[in-house]
Image (cartoon, rainbow, N blue to C red):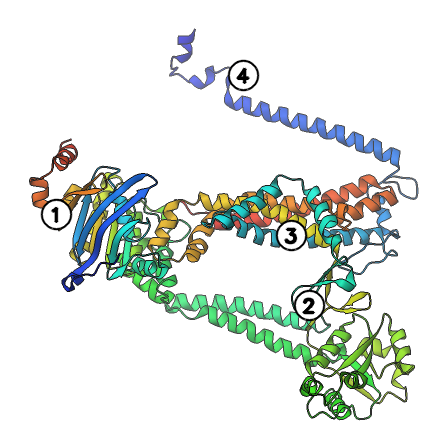
Amino acid sequence: MTVTLPATDYSKIISCHNVNKWYGDFHVLKGIDLEVSSGEVIVILGPSGSGKSTFIRCINRLEEHQEGDIIVDGITLSHDVRNIAEIRREVGMVFQQFNLFPHLTVMENVTLAPIHVRKWSREHAEEVAMKWLTRVGIPEQAQKYPGQLSGGQQQRVAIARTLAMEPKILLFDEPTSALDPEMIKEVLDVMRDLAHEGYTILAVTHEMGFARTVADRVIFMDGGVIVEENEPLPFFNDPQHERTKLFLSQILNH
Amino acid sequence: MAESKLTPNPSGGQESVPPWRDIRIIGIFAQIAFVVLVIMGAMWLLGNVTDNLGRLGGFRCPDGTSSFSCGYNFLKVDSQFDISESVIDYDPSDTYGRALLVGLMNTIKVGVLGIIFATILGVLAGIARLSDNWLVSKATGWYIDLMRNTPLLLQLFFIYFGVILLFPPIRDAIQLGDLPVYLSQRGINMPGPVFLPSFATWLAFVVAGIILAFVIWILLGRREERVGKASNRAFWVVFGFFTVSIIGWFVASNSNKLDQSFMIAKSERILAFTDLADNMERRLGAANLNEIDLMVEEGELTSEEVDEAAYTLCVISESASEVNFTAELRRLNIPYTVNRSTRPDQATAKYAAGECEIYVADTVILTGERPLLEDPFAQAIVPTLERPVRISIPEIEGLNFVGGIKISPNFAALLIGLVLFTGAYIAEIVRAGIQSVSKGQSEAARALGLSESQRLRLVVLPQAMRVIIPPLTSQYLNLVKNSSLAIAVGYPDLFAVAFTTLNQSGQAIQVFLMVMAAYLTLSLSISALLNWYNKRIALVER
């Protein structure tokens, strides 16, 4: 099924239409529709098992959706490896467990993809890497190995690694969930800066403060569907659905 | 009582512990007990050995006394048995010592090649086992299960008696496509390099090239650090190495006159190597030797005429000069036939008797054949260009193959058996290693846009290596030790030769001590090498 987009929709950097996914018999995503404008910051909330992580992982094909269309920056995600490769070049992802390459130094972690995928020269890649490491505040750790860094530092390296590929879209999959409380702030600060810089961001997170202050839109998912979406203020102050109210009361009142 | 034990004792609780409960004293006592047991065991074994030596008369010197070194005098005695294949020169008049050395080198040969091929097979099979492709993954699974669940000895017998010995005899040898590779009962004959004497000169240049490459690498690295700007290090390293190697190739080809092969021809017109071509063109009435095939096709020339005109060469079979000379003739498309002799005097006799018109010999042999140079028929002595390495191609001649390299059926059976068997175990180790790398690593690699092969090569395999190396080491050791099953398929490895030596000389303990020492040395070397590598790739943690 092909979807012809109206001309105005070119500002939509991500378009998802009726995305369905099953794990065996289990229906994880039940007809997700979502349009994301360029530069928009979206926070996805939801209880565990609601399909929020699965959904953003479909966007760069870490998970395969079985029905519906996902169009990223004008490229339709299909079984064509070239399309997948092109989309992955535009979409960066930061993981809960950082997933830094432990056998490579911080510098090598950040330059690996630019050198092998973008085919940059080592000098250029290292220059760019240094710029990003400075931006996330850890240029002095460049020659260390991931195992020698704290969790917060590792997550910032992971962000620098993603940014070095110069993506337009950033996916954050619970980036602060594996961090000690005092390290969460350093990572959120970096994310906040990126949001202000015009990156398109989709973040799955439980950081309500971040959602409230940074997000353009908050999406609440449960049971594989988008239950409610709204701007942060009305979303938090005046949730419409019972399920949303219950969720918010559980996480906000403890 | 129970309460008093638990009561903390503020005034030096340490002293009040009775010795049989003091962990430090228990530790020391256990060590002493262990050492005593080991010493007792060793003394018992030593006593046995001494008894047996006394009974068998080993370690006895000619003057009636007994000493350790005298026990090994038998190594200097002629072995008087033949060994079917050898890396170095050997015949029955050589000593037992040399026979054992031949065996050791044969073991090393099968061990090194076995390790290389088993690793390649194992890594590929390990990756294939994890393939998304159902057929590839299942087929690999069957291979691994078959190999791991049947005895190696059975597999060796099957490959040797059930496969290789059922190949056709030489005259019906199976050729692999159009390649000059032949399978027959006598093993595998295939093209291989022949190292001519000037190879040594070239090798010196290659070594110099490697040293130069290292120096360039280090110097440019220092300069980069000083200037703070990256230079094209890899390019200059490769450039330096190849420049020196290529110069060395030409120097070795031209300057080493002493090692060059010479020919003596019966034609006054032949004064240089290229004259051979001119002379042949004249004989055939062809403008260009490259057109011979075309002329035969068009009927201007019959193949009988070409055969008639072909030079006949008297050569010493399998000599460097033969390979060198015929390769040059083939390059110039000059037709020739070869008349081979095993010894120089036979070759010169044939030449003198007029059986051939050209005699080809190494310079060294030639100087020993002075009368030949005074032969009135010998009109020309032409040095030929000698390349350091030539590729020799096997050809069927009568009931045997000439040229190329030959892999005996025994060696082939042993190598294939060891590679298939060990490869299956390595495949499982590689699979486990790959699976030990967390899924997140692959996801991160994919999310960054790395291709599947880059993901494997740059992210997964380097990390899997940490898990793979220790069990891989024991598989390498198993392969080397399992190579002693060679005796079952008649390959003369260290164990097989040692067994014959032992039967003939009766020096059981000496021979076994030597064989044990040899295997121990090989095993420890492999372990040391892989441990060093493992330490190098270990992860840096805080």
Camera-side residue: A16 or B84?
A16
N-term-proximal mark, 2 vs 3: 3
Count residues near mark 2 (Cα–Cα under 10 Å), then give few for <14, some for 14-19, many for 20+.
some
Measured in 3D between alpha carbons, the distance from the residue under mark 3 to the one under mark 4, in whole angstroms, is 54 Å
Camera-side residue: A6 or B314?
A6
Q: Please state which amino acid type lies under the numbered disc 1.
A: Thr
Measured in 3D between alpha carbons, the distance from the residue under mark 2 to the one under mark 3, in whole angstroms, is 24 Å
User: Where residue B114 is drawn, which disc sits there?
Assistant: 3
N-term-proximal mark, 3 vs 4: 4
Q: Please state which amino acid type lies under the numbered disc 4.
A: Trp
Which image quarter holds the N terminus of chain A?
bottom left
Residue ID for mark 1? A213
Secondary-structure class at tag 3: helix
Q: Please state which amino acid type lies under the numbered disc 2.
A: Pro
Q: Is residue B52 above or below residue B363?
A: above
Task: Write down the chain letter for disc 3.
Answer: B
Q: Is residue A220 above or below residue A68?
A: above
Residue ID for mark 4? B20
Camera-side residue: B12 or B1?
B1
